[in-house]
Amino acid sequence: MFCRSCNMSFKAQCISKINILRHITNQTTGVERDPAPVFFNANVQQLLKKLTRVDLRTVFRTKRYGVALKTPEYKFLTAEELNMVMKEAQEKAEQKLQMPPVVKAHVDEPEVLSYDYELQKHSETKFVFTDISFGISDVERTIVVRDLNGVLRKATPDERLRMNETYFPKPGRKIRMPHMFEKEYLKRLLDQGKYEFVLDRACLQFEPDQPIYQDITATTYEAVDTARHYSSLRSTRHFGPFAFHLAWNRCIDNFLLDLIQTDRLDETVALIQLYHIVNPEAESASAKYKPGLEHKFIQAYVESDSKKRSVLELALQANVELHKQRAETEAGIRRAHGHA
């Protein structure tokens, strides 16, 4: 069975509703919510891609990260060859814009395998045993630690990361955390607007379920929202998780104001729809969008859930007047040309 209106199968809709119910249950019982089921929802992914606003010039721009630049290559192409090249560029852009996953932080205590207290004081250092067989993923690789008190346990996430990097290093990843992620240096980079650089390095250095990775990305997202530097992340792989972070934490008003002021009503509607999916218990979640009634749909959110209602109402009213003036001008041009 298939739903034409939302392009989702009936089974996918059921799974989505189940995830939303779990989301509400966890919120009411005090259990930390898991964003992964919502983030990977097909509708959510589609809305995030729309908000990213793909611009090939931005996607393929040169990043000055200290890497030697390649000499540009120029070619003469026919119209057919140009279309093929543009199609390949679109496919590469989709790969480059693959969003980092948003998952729940992994804070589980390492599992204890045995208590061998007769081995305590046998050594002054811990022993780490790592399975270095090829063909095993870093997540599934067996790594155990013998503590000084004789306890044999599985490695912590930090120990696992260091051992994997020791035996199977990844290009650009450091065994020790770079100083740039320390609070003092991180603030300096964010004040300079190096948001994308910080997020790129964080994706390279950490895993998505590490608490430190989520702290760094959240700090960066909040800095972007506070400064309203949305264009600095636009058309990058980080814009989707950034928009999801705002919706997840119920702080989309600044972003919404920017979209209204720049007359991006389609993206404004997409942002509110994202907010409703992430927060199905919102008062305005019952509002349904109908093509041509963008202002009414936006007004429903502004009146019910916005934290900056007065500012958003003024911006929305100004946008309504802009569209009225534009319609009157177009009607006048048609009358001047003899059209009814």
Image (cartoon, helix red, strand yellow):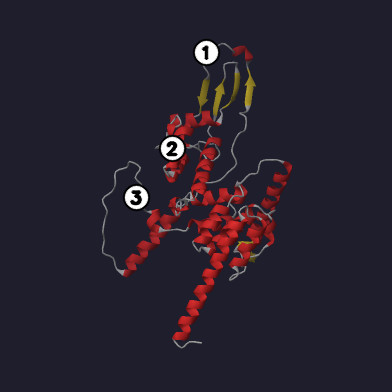
Position above or below: 120 against 12 = above
Q: Can residue 132 be seen from the camera position used here? A: no
| Point 62% across, 56% down: residue | 309
Mark 3 nearby-residue class (10 Å; few <14, some 14–19, many ≥20): few
Position above or below: 116 against 53 = above
Q: Which residue is mark 2?
A: 188
- In terms of secondary structure, where does tag 3 sit? loop
Work out how far the residue at label 2 is from the one at label 1, CA to CA, in angstroms. Answer: 40 Å
Tell me which numbered mark, 2 or 3, is placed earlier along the sequence.
3
Work out how far the residue at label 3 is from the one at label 1, CA to CA, in angstroms. Answer: 50 Å
Tell me which numbered mark, 3 or 1, is placed earlier along the sequence.
3
Mark 2 nearby-residue class (10 Å; few <14, some 14–19, many ≥20): few
Q: Can residue 192 be seen from the camera position used here? A: yes
Task: Give whichever of 297, 123 is nearer the camera.
Answer: 297
Task: Give whichever of 178, 111 is nearer the camera.
Answer: 178
Tell me which numbered mark, 2 or 1, is placed earlier along the sequence.
1
- In terms of secondary structure, where does tag 2 sit? helix
Q: Which residue is mark 3?
A: 62
Residue 306: image location, x then y, percent? 63, 55
| Point 67% across, 63% down: residue | 287
Q: Which residue is mark 1?
A: 124
Residue 141: image location, x then y, percent? 53, 33
Q: Amino acid at mark 2?
A: Arg
Q: Amino acid at mark 1?
A: Glu
Decide: marks 2, 1 in contact (CB < 8 A)?
A: no
